[in-house]
Structure formats: structure tokens, C-alpha cells
Image (cartoon, helix red, strand yellow):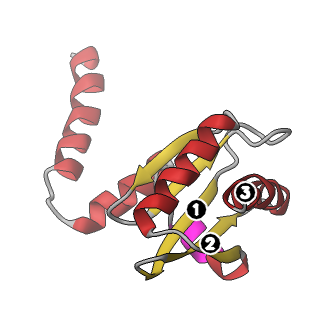
Amino acid sequence: MIKKTVILIPALFLTVILSGGCAHYSTDLNAFFGTGIEDLEKARAEGKEKVFPYSYDTAFERVTEIMKKNKLTVYQSNKKEKYIVALGFQKQIDTTRVGIFFEPVSDKETRITLSSLSSLALSKAEAIIFGGLGK
């Protein structure tokens, strides 16, 4: 009886949370599982930003190429929501995230903002991403 209870209680808990259909729960689950980007969005105010002479699609593709070339990991990516979350900057803890946010300024220009809770990771991201886009 105890073994069934140990299995049923977590299953019931997950069923209640996942079947709620409310955005409130999904946000809480993102925070619980560490998949939310709210902290990186808040850190944008202290982030690094620069406007580049690329359309949004081109800028997104170029950043993705730069990340591959530098062996960075795409932790999360949402082209519709205009962001990428990257991991793997040298001498950083593997879970140090850097947010890369895209904002089309015009058809031919895109503002890119980098944010991180680590100033060292932010500095490295700026050199790699902005340096790569400037070439």
C-alpha cells in the first residue's frame, strides 16, 4: 500500500498542475525547472546593446552561426519571441546563461541586447557575439 501511495501522490500532483490550463502554472513550472528567461529579461537594463546593419532574420542566423563556430550551446531559442539563450562561455560554470535579444529597428537594422547575471559571461558574450557580427 505504501509503494502505491509513493507513486500516486507525485502523479496526482503533476496531473493537477499540468491540467490546470492556466498560464500561471506554466510560468511557475518554467521557474521550477529553470527554463524561464524572466531573470535575463530583467537583466537587459544592465546589458550590452548594439544596432547592426542586418535584417532580423539575417541577424538571428548570423548569431546562430557565430555560436556554432565558437562551440557555444543554444540552451533555448525562440525565433518568434526574438531571443536565444546561450551557455558554454569559456571559464564559466556550464549553467551560466546569456540572453541574446533581438529587436528589429527597420527592415535593414536590428538591435541586439545581451544580458546575463554574470558580468564576466556578459563581457565574453559581447566580445564573441558583437565581435563576430562586426566582421
Residue at the spot 59% in from the left edge and 60% down from the top edge: 99
Quadrant where the N terminus is found in the figure: top left
Label 1 and label 3: CA atoms lie apart by 18 Å
> In the image, residue 60 lies at what x, y percent?
48, 57
Label 3 residue SS: loop
Badge number at residue 100: 1
Residue at the spot 36% in from the left edge and 66% down from the top edge: 81
Q: Nearer the viewer, mark 1 or mark 3?
A: 3
> In the image, residue 123 lies at what x, y percent?
83, 61
Q: 131 or 21: nearer the eye?
A: 131
> In the image, residue 93 lies at what x, y percent?
77, 40
Q: 29 or 81: nearer the eye?
A: 81
Q: Residues within 10 Å of mark 1 (few under 14, many from 20)?
A: many
Question: Of the residues shown, which amino acid type is indicated by label 2?
Answer: Thr
Image quadrant where residue 46 sits: bottom right
Badge number at residue 113: 2
